[in-house]
Image (spheres, coloured by chain):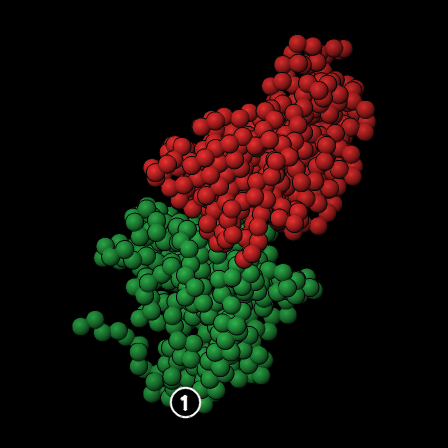
Chain colours: A green, B red
């Protein structure tokens, strides 16, 4: 429960705004046919990745999901390289060979977006086990969705993390739907957080639209993990703004559902209202960030479009890692 | 048998018992299945007394679903009779607005009693809308002050006795105190049933308060020395009962600093016994307003940050005697004992083939048991 400095508030806003602008732009560009493959957008969920990752260091690891752009940006991956990756260009985070669902940057502790639903849990147990052996207070954070919460991999990971008392934090991002299936139907217990008690770890629920709520809960969970207190499960409840993937007709949602969310719950709007009404940050400084971010994303898209694609010869590079 | 119009409302908050206190302290986790069991125990008690109808707030997390499933199996338990149970047909937002809406509808229907399952926060929401309808309070967890931590069957019996008029209200009911928080110009902002606390934390964040060094002022409606939470600070210094007509106002300061009235160890949360410094403590008479000194920070009501103070705001806390009526379960059942309100009269009930046949027939036609004469 630390008080945030003005610099931290500005950083939080910049990160959330960058994610939002990035996703809104990918949404628009995808519709023009310029982006290969599938993309799953994180808009609406910014407070979760930002609130959690602001508690992390570069040597902490996160495992992400198929909806990973927000986690990447919040963990410090360069948005210009990310955009190039999504466009499949050699300048991308993974030299254009991964695409949206495989963006990774180990120098930032980002172990990768992941096309396998529930794939992040076992990965983060490995990272957390390594951190435990290194004894430098490092932690691993697994982001996963409500769909993944029903997968065996997540149950195995929760069990392993508890048995080995790993410095692992499990962030269940309950965005309302596993593809087109409502989580209120598909999650048999009432809350994903309730499953924590079965593994002997604390489980808490936070309002995932509220940066401050996520940030505070993450602070306690990360502190606990760093101090050897073991794993925690945090469920952030919110709703995504776009479809499961771009092109999803979303016939399973109410007509005004997203419109209402954007008007009443939006994390950026709430953050702005709060820090300006409390007098902590003048609105002008937030406007300046909006402008900066817009310019950054403009540049990212322009560069990504102009950059070259990998060649056929690149197919056989980066296949094996040399440990020598 | 009670008059056919007698209806008991049931509010069971699906989301109580899940907040950050599970992480920062060792607060109890209260599963939905247990809330559903408690509702069934309340219904069994109401049914045994012959309360004809109950209405319940809907929820999407499974309390109502569990209860409805049990209702479908009632024929397998011939000793059980429930009131006719209706789940309110209303939109469900999965927020506190559901509770507010459900209580408003129960008020419209003139229910006799509302049974509330939840914590201090749930009871506060109900209190905001229930008017003079008495509440039977049930705590879902160990983290609360206002509601009773009691077996639901017993609370259900007391609720039924009051609803049916078999124990007089002047015996059964207590009028509670309430703290209103308003802006300095009088605009209502919040109410509290137990305490109002000023914190220097600038954001509502995860709501709970668990670090004593962030607290500066405390207003309590009552202060029990055996309470959990912030009101225990006052309760361990100068206890004030729920029936006393005053409350307390305390100014807090860093523990062991100079000029303090006391530094005490208080259980400010489950598993959290913290040193708290108290600078001043004074009685607060009903109607008296305290202008809170802070100009930045948050106001917590009943232990949860609810109001963020905007720059330039000034807030006022006022103690009133206009809180909700609650059923005093020990007093109600003592009176029932002394006056034979639960003595069986007439033929034996709740068993035997005639009763069982009727329950089976009702179950087959999908009609809830409505005839209570035989059961009483």
Q: Residue at x 59, y 44 (%)?
A: B316
Which percent across, then down, holds residue A307? 42, 88
Using residue A2 as the reference point, say whether residue B119 is left or right of it: right
Answer above or below: position of A32 versus B85: below
Q: Is residue B171 visible?
A: yes
Using residue A194 as the reference point, say whether residue B42 is left or right of it: right
Using residue B32 as the reference point, say whether residue A59 is left or right of it: left
Q: Nearer the viewer, residue A14 or B297?
A: B297
Q: Quadrant of the C terminus of chain A?
A: bottom left
Check the image and name the residue furthest to the front: B259
Answer above or below: position of A71 versus B259: below
Q: Which residue is mark 1?
A: A308
Neighbour tally class for label 1: few under 14, some 14-19, many 20 plus, Cα within 10 Å: some
Q: Secondary structure at mark 1?
A: loop
Which percent across, then down, holds residue B114? 69, 32
Check the image and name the residue furthest to the right: B4
Q: Is residue A195 visible?
A: no
Q: Nearer the viewer, residue B259 or A21?
A: B259
Q: Residue at x 32, y 57 (%)?
A: A139
Which percent across, then down, holds residue A28? 57, 79
Residue B69 sits in quarter:
top right
Image mark 1: chain = A
Q: Residue at x 69, y 10 (%)?
A: B340
């Amino acid at each position: 429960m630390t008080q945030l400095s003005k610099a931290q508030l500005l950083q939080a806003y910049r990160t959330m705004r960058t994610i939002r602008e990035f996703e809104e732009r990918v949404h628009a560009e995808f519709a023009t046919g310029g982006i290969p493959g599938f993309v799953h957008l994180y808009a609406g969920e910014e407070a979760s990745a930002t609130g959690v990752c602001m508690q992390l260091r570069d040597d902490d690891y996160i495992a992400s999901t198929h909806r990973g752009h927000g986690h990447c940006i919040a963990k410090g991956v360069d948005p210009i390289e990310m955009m190039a990756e999504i466009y499949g260009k050699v300048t991308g985070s993974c030299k254009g060979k991964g695409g949206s669902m495989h963006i990774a940057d180990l120098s930032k502790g980002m172990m990768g977006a992941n096309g396998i639903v529930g794939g992040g849990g076992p990965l983060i147990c490995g990272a957390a086990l390594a951190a435990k052996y290194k004894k430098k207070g490092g932690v691993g954070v697994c982001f996963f969705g409500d769909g993944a919460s029903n997968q065996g991999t997540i149950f195995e990971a929760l069990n392993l993390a508890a048995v080995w008392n790993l410095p692992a934090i499990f962030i269940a991002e309950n965005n309302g739907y596993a593809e087109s299936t409502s989580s209120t139907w598909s999650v048999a217990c009432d809350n994903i957080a309730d499953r924590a008690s079965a593994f002997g770890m604390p489980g808490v629920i936070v309002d995932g639209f509220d940066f401050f709520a996520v940030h505070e809960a993450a602070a306690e969970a990360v502190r606990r993990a760093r101090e050897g207190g073991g794993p925690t499960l945090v469920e952030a409840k919110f709703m995504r703004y776009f479809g499961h993937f771009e092109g999803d007709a979303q016939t399973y949602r109410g007509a005004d559902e997203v419109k209402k969310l954007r008007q009443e719950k939006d994390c950026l709007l709430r953050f702005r209202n709060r820090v300006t009404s409390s007098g902590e940050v003048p609105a002008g400084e937030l406007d300046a960030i909006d402008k900066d971010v817009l310019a950054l994303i403009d540049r990212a898209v322009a560069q990504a479009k102009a950059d070259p694609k990998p060649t056929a010869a690149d197919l056989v590079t980066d296949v094996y890692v040399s440990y020598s | 048998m009670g008059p056919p119009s007698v209806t008991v409302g049931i509010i069971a908050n699906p989301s109580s018992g899940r907040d950050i206190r599970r992480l920062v302290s060792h607060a109890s986790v209260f599963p939905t299945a247990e809330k559903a069991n408690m509702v069934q125990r309340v219904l069994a008690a109401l049914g045994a007394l012959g309360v004809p109808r109950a209405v319940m707030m809907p929820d999407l997390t499974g309390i109502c679903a569990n209860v409805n499933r049990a209702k479908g199996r009632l024929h397998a338990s011939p000793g059980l009779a429930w009131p006719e149970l209706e789940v309110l047909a209303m939109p469900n937002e999965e927020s506190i607005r559901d509770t507010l809406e459900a209580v408003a509808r129960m008020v419209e229907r003139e229910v006799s009693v509302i049974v509330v399952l939840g914590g201090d926060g749930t009871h506060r929401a109900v209190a905001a809308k229930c008017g003079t309808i008495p509440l039977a309070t049930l705590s879902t967890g160990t983290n609360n002050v206002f509601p009773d931590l009691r077996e639901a069957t017993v609370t259900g019996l007391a609720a039924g006795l009051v609803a049916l008029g078999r124990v007089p209200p002047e015996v059964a009911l207590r009028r509670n105190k309430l703290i209103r928080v308003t802006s300095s110009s009088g605009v209502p902002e919040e109410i509290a049933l137990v305490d109002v606390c000023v914190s220097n934390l600038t954001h509502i964040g995860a709501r709970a308060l668990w670090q004593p060094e962030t607290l500066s002022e405390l207003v309590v409606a009552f202060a029990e020395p055996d309470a959990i939470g912030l009101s225990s600070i006052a309760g361990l210094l100068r206890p004030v009962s729920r029936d006393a007509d005053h409350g307390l106002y305390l100014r807090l300061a860093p523990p062991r600093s100079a000029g303090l009235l006391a530094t005490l160890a208080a259980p400010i949360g489950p598993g959290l016994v913290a040193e708290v410094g108290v600078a001043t403590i004074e009685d607060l008479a009903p109607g008296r307003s305290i202008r809170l000194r802070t100009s930045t920070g948050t106001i917590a009501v009943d232990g949860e940050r609810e109001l963020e103070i905007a720059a330039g705001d000034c807030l006022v806390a006022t103690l009133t005697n206009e809180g909700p009526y609650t059923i005093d379960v020990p007093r109600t059942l003592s009176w029932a004992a002394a006056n034979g309100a639960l003595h069986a009269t007439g033929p034996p009930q709740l068993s035997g083939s005639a009763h069982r046949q009727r329950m089976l027939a009702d179950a087959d036609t999908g009609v809830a048991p409505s005839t209570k004469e035989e059961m009483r």
